[in-house]
Image (spheres, grey):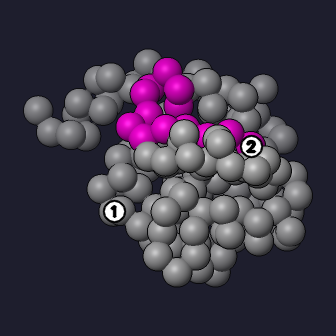
Amino acid sequence: MTLKDFLFSVCGALHNGDSGTDSPMDSNGKKRVLVVDDQAMVAESLKMVLEFQGYEVHTAESGRDALTIFEPKKYALIFTDFEMPGMNGHEFASIVKARDPNQPIIMVTAYADTILNMEPLPQIDMVLCKPWSLDQLRSALKKFISS
């Protein structure tokens, strides 16, 4: 069984079929999500799961790369890693929120305890710990995308 087949068998039932009308979407009605992570395997895994849920997913390997494709109101949700070379996820989130204060951003990190013990991070709407579970991902999607 390939990774793609496995993810489909596990995640296929998560999609609720609701395309909504108030979130940024592509021309086919798919809501757009941006995944920012310098670890290609992590970004690709999250991308595959989200695509199985019916989202159009864009990826970037760094905060700087992500800023070149980010536009206000383009993405229904952004997932970003914390620890990345050049610009960490907090710095990236700060720039995004300055451009679009209503943009939902989820920090996906192995350093969740450290981040949660830092000063309040108003730029971050939620923190998911790596490795994340499908239930955690489902809750995040429901909170920020589902109507």
Give the numbered dot on residue 134: none
Where does label 1 land, which residue?
Answer: 40
- What is the three-letter code of the residue carrying label 2? Asp
Decide whether residue 131 is among the magenta residues. Answer: yes
Label 1 environment density (alpha carbons within 10 Å; few <14, some 14–19, many ≥20): few
Q: Residue furthest left?
A: 1
- Residue 48, by quadrant, is top left
- What is the three-letter code of the residue carrying label 1? Ala
Q: What is the spatial separation of the Cα atoms under label 2 and label 1, in whole angstroms? A: 23 Å
Where does label 2 land, which residue?
Answer: 125
In the image, residue 83 lies at what x, y percent? 49, 63
Q: Which of 23/84 is in front?
A: 84
Q: Which of 111/5 is in front?
A: 111
Can residue 5 be spotted in the picture?
Answer: yes
Q: Residue at x 66, y 62 (%)?
A: 90
In the image, residue 114 lies at what x, y percent? 56, 46
Which element type, helix, strand or loop, lies under badge 2?
loop
Label 2 environment density (alpha carbons within 10 Å; few <14, some 14–19, many ≥20): some
